[in-house]
Amino acid sequence: MHYVALFLLFLVRMFKEWRPAMNFNMSDPAVLIGMSVVGLLIVLAIVFAILRQRNSKTTEALRSRFGPEYDLALREYGSRRKAEAKLLERVNRVKQMEVRQLTLAERNRYLTDWESVQARFIDHPRGAVTEADEMMNSLLQSCGYPVGAFDQRASDISVHHARLVEPYRRANAITVRAGKNEATTEELRSAMILYRALFEELIQTKTDIAPTEISRPAAA
């Protein structure tokens, strides 16, 4: 709106300078056309300023909500307009879901299950990571996210948990490699830690198991 104000001020000053030297005939078609053009320019300037301000607010809001996911979308879609349209699609999609917090009973059940999975990691790291991935799917479903392909799940949770999407992708990639018996023991340990971060975020608590308890697994 700052630019619009400057433009209007410019027109006012020009009119004041021209008025003494010019005798306007308001019935002259040329004068009427000129005034119409000026009025149209003013309207267009105002519309442009409003749209620019609205787009700026949208960009700021999406950057704040999605963080690194915003930059990833820019690289993927090649333009700010396309990237922001896709991110807004995510927001609108999640708005249609009934995303909720877990009940106390559900939370306690998942905590117990997680402790069991994490304990099994020491002797069976590959199986434990696979179980952790399956538990994330179940947990997301319990929170109201629909069952679907991994990429869609990652897009859905990015709306409320953007900072954990990239770790979730890394953990899932390791799980896929583990299914082919291609992941190293250290990679499996990293995946378990990444899953735990997402798990804690979704149930909104810290697990009681210390990190050292999953730092020395047996060979897969």
Image (cartoon, helix red, strand yellow):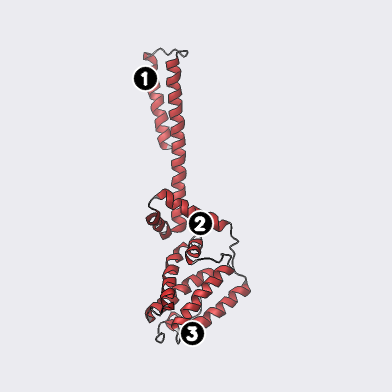
Return the x and y of residue 184 as percentages of the image width and height: 37, 80
Find numbered disc 3 in the image and state the secondary structure of the residue it sits on.
helix
Residue position for label 1: 17
Choose the circle earlier in sequence order: 2 or 3: 2
Image height of 216 relative to 86, above or below = below
Image-quadrant location for residue 123 = bottom left
Q: Give above or below for 26 relative to 72.
A: above
**Do residues under tags 2 and 3 come within 8 Å of each other at their CB atoms?**
no
**Is residue 204 at least partly visible in the picture?**
no
**Where residue 161 sits: x, y (%)?**
49, 63
Circle 2: element type: helix
Q: Residues within 10 Å of mark 1 (few under 14, many from 20)?
A: few
Q: Nearer the viewer, mark 3 or mark 1?
A: 3
Residue for point 58% across, 67% down: 143
Residue at which label 2 appears: 90
Quadrant of the image containing the C terminus = bottom left
Q: Are marks 1 and 2 in contact (CB under 8 Å)?
A: no
For label 3, the crowd category at 10 Å Cα-Cα, with few meaning under 14, some 14 to 19 and many 20 or more, is: some
- What residue does disc 3 label? 120
- Left or right for 12, reference 157: left
The image quadrant where one finds the N terminus is top left
Q: Amino acid at mark 2?
A: Arg
Q: Residue at x 42, y 37 (%)?
A: 2
Q: Say what secondary structure mark 1 lies in.
A: helix
User: In this orientation, which residue lies closer to the viewer: 47 or 188?
Assistant: 188
Q: CA distance from mark 1 to mark 2?
A: 54 Å
- The numbered mark, 1 or 2, whose residue comes first in the sequence reads 1
